[in-house]
Amino acid sequence: MSYLTHLKRSNDSSDNRWVVKKDKTSGLIREVKLIYKPSEYYAMNKHKGEHARPLHNKNALIKILENDKTRRNQKMEKV
């Protein structure tokens, strides 16, 4: 089961947020991290200001993963 399928089926807490890391060369997602306590994440990354990675809620993450999936499929079709 893919992480996208898992997200769509699960009933996660509304407090959970995710950080998405992308590959610099291809722009595709390379890592997704679940942040259980967003308030602690903000406190620890306050010094980064606007350069801190944004936190995404469940619906936003699903859209990001779906877009990444279509980009990967298009890339594979070209090869």
Image: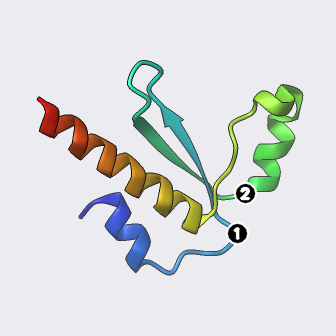
Along the line of sight, the residue nearer the viewer: 68 or 35: 68
**Nearer to the camera, 56 or 47:** 56
**Quick one: SS at disc 2?**
loop
Q: Residue at x 77, y 28 (%)?
A: 51
Q: Quadrant of the C terminus?
A: top left
Mark 2 / mark 1, whichever is N-terminal: 1
Q: Residue 1: horizontal and vertical position, in percent?
A: 23, 64
Of circles 2 and 1, the one toward us is 1
26 or 10: nearer the eye? 26
Residue 13, percent across and down?
62, 75
Which residue in the structure is indicated by mark 1?
A: 15
- Which numbered circle lies on residue 61? none
Q: Which residue type does callout 2 highlight? A: Lys
Residue drawn 54% across the image and 75% down it: 12
Q: Are marks 2 and 1 in contact (CB under 8 Å)?
A: yes
The residue closer to the viewer here, 21 or 75, is 75
From the viewer's perspective, is residue 35 above or below residue 12? above
Mark 1 neighbour class, 10 Å CA radius: few under 14, some 14 to 19, many 20 or more: few
Query: Few, some or many C-alpha atoms within 10 Å of disc 2 (few <14, some 14-19, many ≥20)?
Result: few
Q: Which mark is residue 37?
A: 2
Look at 38% across and 25% down and name the residue there: 26
User: On the picture, is 62 further left or further right than 2?
Assistant: right
**Residue occupying the far front of the picture:** 78
In this picture, residue 30 sits left or right of residue 64: left
The amino acid at mark 1 is Asp
The residue that appears at 44% across and 26% down in the rendered structure is 23
Mark 2 to mark 1 CA distance (whole Å): 7 Å
